[in-house]
Amino acid sequence: MAKVNFKRLRQGASAPANTITDPRDLFNALPEKVSGLDYLRGPQDQVLAAWHDRRDERDLVIKMNTGGGKTLVGLLIARSWLNEGIRPVAYLVPDDFLTAQVTTEAGRVGIATTNDPRSPEYQQGRAVLVGTFAKLFNGLSVFGVGGSVSKPPSHSLGAVIIDDAHACIAQADHVFRLRVDDDSEAYSDLLTLFAGDLKAQSPNGLLDLEARRRTAIQEVPFWAWQDKQDQVLSILHPISDSALKWGWPLVVDSLPLCTAVITSDAFEIYPPCHPTETLLGFSQAQRRVYLTATLADDSVLVRHFGAAPESVSRPIFPSSAGDIGDRMILVPQQLVPKATDEEVRDLVLDLAEDQNVVVIVPSHARADWWREDAALVLDRNNIHQGVEQLRKNPQLGLVVLINRYDGIDLPGDACHVLVLDGLPEALDGPERLTQARLTGSTNLLGRQIQRLEQGMGRATRSNEDHAVVLLLGARLAERLNAPEARGFFSPATRAQLDLAAEIASEVEADSLDDLHDIMEQCLERDKDWVAYSKGALAQVRYDTSRIADTASAERRAFDAALRGDYVVAAQEQQTVVNGITDDAATQALQRQRLASYTNFFDPSGAQQTQKTANLANRRLLRPLTGVLYERLKAASRPQGEQASSWLQAKYTSGNDLLLGFKAVLQDLDWGPRTPQFEQAVRDLAEHIGHIGQRPEDTLGRGPDGLWALRDGTFYVIEAKSGADPGHPVYKKDAEQLSNAMDWFRQQYPNSEATPLLIHPEERFDSHAAIPTGCRVVTTKRLARLRESVSAFATGLVANDAFRDPARVTSLLNDHGLSAANFVRRFSVPGRH
């Protein structure tokens, strides 16, 4: 009896699954789907329909919540391209961990994949290449590199899906960067080459670099960088095919346009925009789709990837944004303001006795605070093994992740309690430089919020997941309370934060035990909580895209400069500067870039532009001449009146005030975070009724801190918060305080000042000269200061005392914070 070989027919070139281009019909035609995958979910169907209508656009952004099925959406798009004849196709993810997940998902629906770009299945369009973002984005890419250090493609690429685009963008920041580590000869040569230029910016900054202090960081002035390009090339070229081989082909042609930042760890070089045209596989691809869950600012795709703004400005998303896991988001120290950090930690440890609790911390230093009680502490070296243990063992206990806010999936029982302990911190040179340049800007706030949101999503990887998310740290809570912060969160997270606010207004939690009971309602799936939570999300919709009007002009300016057309580059960059009206710090930074383009054809005009930029943002480069120090003026009102007025302008409620004081005290503690410590010293001045300044930070000279008191006297402050306890004040630190006093006398010749050194020990080394009148805020005295400030804050919120100048004055006296008592109470004389 004759039989038809239907298997051969359905595998042929004309089989439906190999010819259909509408991804929804394609899904229905796939013959090898596993049981249970009979139809697309609503959000998937909606997104694929919208994509099919716009499939001819080169750059498209698809936004779907984590767990909404965007992997399958991406795979169907990739298969649809192949059926259309656009081939080969790559599906790229941030790391190998996610590569395995995509391959597994493809197997469930019967879409052929491979991880080998040399395979005939990929080259001939029969399989989708699944790999890491780094496979395409590197200076030795098999898909080809253009520019002066060209590498012909050994494998072609017709279209590309970039999944978890937010994480891939963060990776791209490192791809388009040259890093010369401090243990190399090239590092020493570069430091020597620019030593004079760095000293002109900050003599103390250069000394810190030469001493390899952990907090040392300086930017090379763009005029010196451009002028010394021949010497830079002669230093870097010998290591361009070894230490720098992955980035050199991508960056070398834009080297004169780059920013160079040097820290105690490395000399790092990066361009203002990513020169993605050098990556032939990416730049020549016919179609590009970016899949993302938390990319709040799509401008980055225009600025750094050269994507078409008219397409990116209209992202594709489902009709509802509420298909997200159930999260109860709580800020313990807002609900129970009197709770200490140690009490909150005990609460977390209690939860970890019965289930996995994952704590994400910003640094190794913060990880140490949890380490003694942690089952695992995971960093980039052991993260994947640790995540596997979490997935296999739902009662592993407390696990700490160091600075890992994305790329980790903890579904189901792997994690039902997630803790974010503190704000994400900048770790490398470029990040630290950006953080310093943009202090106080909405731009920086947006970056921090995006990383926080990525971290908050680690435990809810589908809309069936549930988790309690605890946000710890006064500084983190303060950022969340910023009026501008709300707009940076995704709509679904905003809705869940609103639930948190409603919970806070509804309950009167006297202790963390009460908070524990509230969390149990989520963890034990209380039906009323589930209904309340789901109801809040039911009508959530996606926002329209956030595209900065200046992004296209910024990219055009860079492209023009890359062509050597610096006049046009400056014209386009002027458009960028003019277009920023609501963020002074960011506008000043863009004006500095305008100066760097202008310097190629008008050095004198560039210095004038840089002077304007520096006046608006003192943390930017200081021009060669013309920057004058602005003297600090004491408050015109008595200390109590000044404090009350400032606090009322700063804080709208007693709770906000208490949180603000806690944020200051959180940073006003010993440890390696010296920039935050120095800022806290300045902030404390204003919280207690003085006027503060950071001359060394903004001018490159002078003391770390300067306080102006009402009586016309000053405190000249050098902060050595990172000094090792048990060691005396060394000669160099004593000299810095003496130099700071010399600077003060030049700037304030008719004024008196008390030199204040913040150092664990009051004892000076025998070789160190004690500055006349020097007082030292020691370990014990700083502890006393912190206790007094905390008690002062508690008094201020009682019956809104901070609104009454007389009561503020009384509280200042009661806690030794008045100008008459401050030095005597919180410092001791320096001694040998």
Image (cartoon, rainbow, N blue to C red):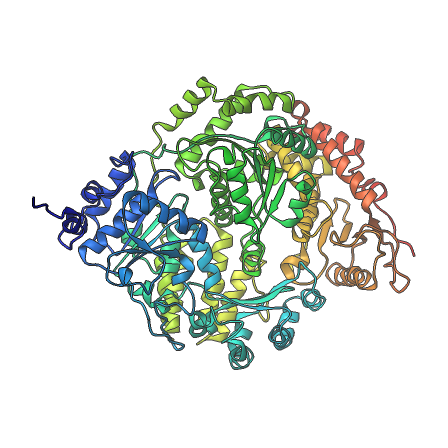
Q: Residue 397 appears at what percent x and percent y?
A: 60, 35
Q: Quadrant of the N terminus?
A: top left
Residue 546 in view, yes or no: no
Q: Position of residue 494 (x, y in %)?
A: 44, 34
Extreme-front residue of the structure = 1
Residue at 10% over, 47% down = 4
Point 47% across, 68% down: residue = 246
* Residue furthest left as drawn: 1
Q: Is residue 265 above or below residue 514?
A: below
Residue 114 image point, x, y percent: 33, 56
Q: Is residue 576 visible?
A: yes
Q: Does residue 303 sit above or below 789 in this rendering? A: below
Using the image as rendered, state which of residue 311 and residue 131 is in the foreground.
131
Q: Nearer the viewer, residue 80 or 540?
A: 80
> Which quadrant, please, contains the C terminus?
bottom right
Whole-percent x, y for residue 493 in the image: 44, 35
For the point 65% across and 45% down, the residue is 366
Total number of numbered discs in the rendering = 0
Classify residue 546 as left or right of residue 364.
Answer: left
In the picture as drawn, the residue positioned furthest to the top comes out as: 528
Left or right: 28 in relation to 224: left
